[in-house]
Every structure is written in C-alpha cells, then in structure tokens.
Image (cartoon, rainbow, N blue to C red):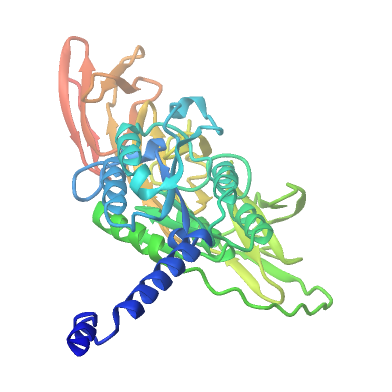
Amino acid sequence: MATASAEANRSSNGAPAGARQEQKGAVVAAAAAKSAAGGTSSKSIALIIDASGSMNAKLPEGRTRIEGAKAAVEDIVGKLPADVRISLRAYGHQSPTSRRDCKDTALLVGFDTLAAAKDGIIAKARELKAQGYTPITYVLKLAAEDVGKEAAKPRVVILVSDGKETCEGDPCATAKALADADASLVIHTIGFAVDTAAKFQLQCIARVARGKYWEAEGAGRLAAALGEAARTEAPPQQTTQIVVARPRPGKLEIKNAELAGHVVTEAESGKSVGKLSSSQSVMELPSGFYNVTFGNAVWKSVEIKPAETTVLTPGVLAVQNAALTGHKVLDAETGVEIGNVTALKNSITVLPSTFSVTFGAALWKDIEVKLGERKVLNPGVVSVPGADIRGYPIKDEAGTVVASVSATQSSAPLPPGKYTLEIGAQKVPIELAAGQKLEIKLN
C-alpha cells in the first residue's frame, strides 16, 4: 500500500507531489520577481504618427497615406505582446497647413500596457485628419519626455514620417542630444513614401540615436516596418573608452553649387560659418551638424565627421520656355516659395525633394528632383498672334483663369493639361502636351 501511495503522488515526469509544489512555488516566485523588476514589460514604445498635409497624397495602391498609416497602426497593436507598454502621439492633425503651426502635436493615448491601450489607440488613430506641418524636432523632444518617465529599458521612440522637418530646429542634432542624455533611449524612424531629403534626415535621426531606419512605399510595408521596429532589440550597452585627442576637422563639399552661394550654419546655434558657391565649393569645418541653404530652403542634419569629406549633391530644376515674369518654385508640402526661375535664369539648384512650380495661376505639381538629378520641365506654349490689347483669358478645367494672351504678351507657357481659350464669346478647347507649341490663328 505504501508503494501504491507513493506512486499515486508522483507526477508524469516522476517528481513527487512535494517536489511539484516546491517547483510551482519557485516558478511563481520567479515570475513575481521578474514582474517586479519590469521584466514582463521590459519595453516602452512611444509611437509617433505623421498626420501632416502631405499624408493626403495617394499611395500606388489607391488609398491615401494617412489611411494606410491608420491601417498599419491597427495591424501592429493586434500583434504585439499584451504587456508591452505603448503610447500614441500624432502631429500635423490639428491645424491646416496655411497656419504653419509648428506646435501642432498631441499625446493621444498615454503610456499603458497594450492590452489596456489597444482600443484607445485604434479609436484615436481612426479620428486623425491629415492637414498640417511637420515639426519633427519639437515632436522628438516631447516624445523623449513622454517615454523618459517610463521605468522600462529600452525606452523606444518610433517615428513615422512622409516628409522632412518643416519648422525650426535640426531633428538629427536634437536626436543625438536626446540619446546622449538618456543611454536607454532608442529612436527608430520609418520613411513612408519619402523623397531623398526626408530619407536623408530620417536616416540621420536613427543613426545617431541607436536606432534603425526602414522605408515603406505602401501600407503593407509600413505595417511590417512598424512590427520590425517594435520588436528590434536595442544594441547592448558597452563600456566606452574615451580617448582625448586634438579635434580634427572635416570638409563640406557642394556639387552643382550656385554662383550666388549657399550659407552654412551650425545646426544648434544657428551661427553662420561661411558660404559655399560655384567659385568655392569646399570648406573645412569642425565635426558636428550643420544646415545649408538652397534658396529659401534648408538642407538640415548635415553631419561633418573628423578627417572626412561630406558631399552634398543637390538637384537642379530647370524650365524650358520660361516666361520673363518668372515661375515660383514652391515646397510641395508647405507651399512656401523656395526660389524662382525666369527666361534670364531658367534653372535653380534645389535640395533633393518634391516641388510645385507656378505658371501664371496654374500649378505644375509633384515634381520630384532626386539626388544629383537635373529635372527639366518642358511646358507647352499657347500663342495667339494678333491678340487683342485687352487680352484673352485661358481657363483650366475648373474654370479658373490661369493665364492670358494679349497684344503685349501673345504667348503663355502652361503645364500639360486641358484648357479653354476664350476669345469674346467663343470658347476654344485646348489639350496641351509637354513641349507642344500651339499657335492659334485669328481670322
């Protein structure tokens, strides 16, 4: 009987009942200790979603970028461990672009376990309306403050953006300062259908803040990138040996520099350190971060490393058959004027980004100029020899007067498209192709 009783109190693996109770107690104690040390929620994630005006642009799949971002957020919160601590912040969603609001951000859902925060994050993401500016520097500071209150390590910021900084400050220099101040801070960045200038900036942010950079062209890839960023482990902290040596300068070189020049300033102080131009395109600089002007635009987060040459290769935007009155070159996202081209100076050096160009009241939109590219716009030209001194209006498909021809200005360059020339009561339909010269004779 004693033997039978002993066998009855053994587990399937042969452990006595008393041993089983001890093992169970040890597991519970270990779990409690792990929980008390923050082991079950060993990561806190501050998720930042771009809701600036450019997020209304269409993706190749048909839906808008902001719709794709909402779907990606919903996807990721359905897949992460329930005990991960997470928050949701957005920017650009409260003010229209015309207000140029550089404080447009809000913490939509504060830190909590994913299990508790999930429904709120999905609901708040669905409410987002893309409309405003891209204040990345300001947002990074606030997100670092949000996650800095968390006890977990690492403390992770994931920034999703489809554009570059549109406000004051240098986001890369700021990211470096934040990472230097908090050894447990990691900033990952995801470029969502970005142009070259935005990619350059987002890569720099991740590089200096112990993070990684991902690129996503569609909503599916964005969801995958968010998942990878959330699961990526922070690099192990290592003992650093500090070697004090005399500082070695680096060099900055600009290809395709303009004769008028490009002002170089320190990113943090804003102090001007010189100007580069076509006559002097290289300068020596102490290591650090700098900003470089291209017309009214600024190439930010330019890192100069000791004993290395950093080369900027801007693009060139040119307009054939440019009008004497000129054409404004605008930042595609903000509408801010970058510079202009005219018949006398028909090209401008620009940072690699996306632009719009005015032709009278018409707008040639979504012109992407890539790194080192010379992009030539070849508008069509409508001419009416012998036009009346009072002029004839040319209207676009919406009925807006975009140009006119007259005795003093008998031709008008226009983007490809459909127009109507009004000669008195007569309406002449026009379908203009790129580079086409269309002459309308009057009987």
Residue 352 rendering spot, x and y as whole percentages:
47, 55
How far across and down, in percent of the image, does residue 355 sit? 42, 43
The one of 150 and 412 positioned closer to us in this rendering:
150
**Residue 422 in the image: above or below residue 60:** above
**Side of 424 relative to 165 (left or right):** left
Q: Residue 299: image x %, image y %? A: 57, 52
Q: Position of residue 380 (x, y in %)?
A: 28, 39
The residue shown at (26%, 46%) is 71
Foreground pick, 97 / 34: 34
- Say which quarter of the image contains residue 117: top left
Q: Nearer the viewer, residue 430 or 302?
A: 302
Q: Quadrant of the N terminus?
A: bottom left
Residue drawn at (39%, 64%) of the image: 231
Residue at (30%, 35%) from the top-left corner?
123
**Horizontal arrangement in the rendering, residue 169 relative to residue 315 (left or right):** right
Question: In which quadrant is the C terminus drawn?
Answer: top left
Name, please, the residue furthest toward the bottom.
Answer: 3
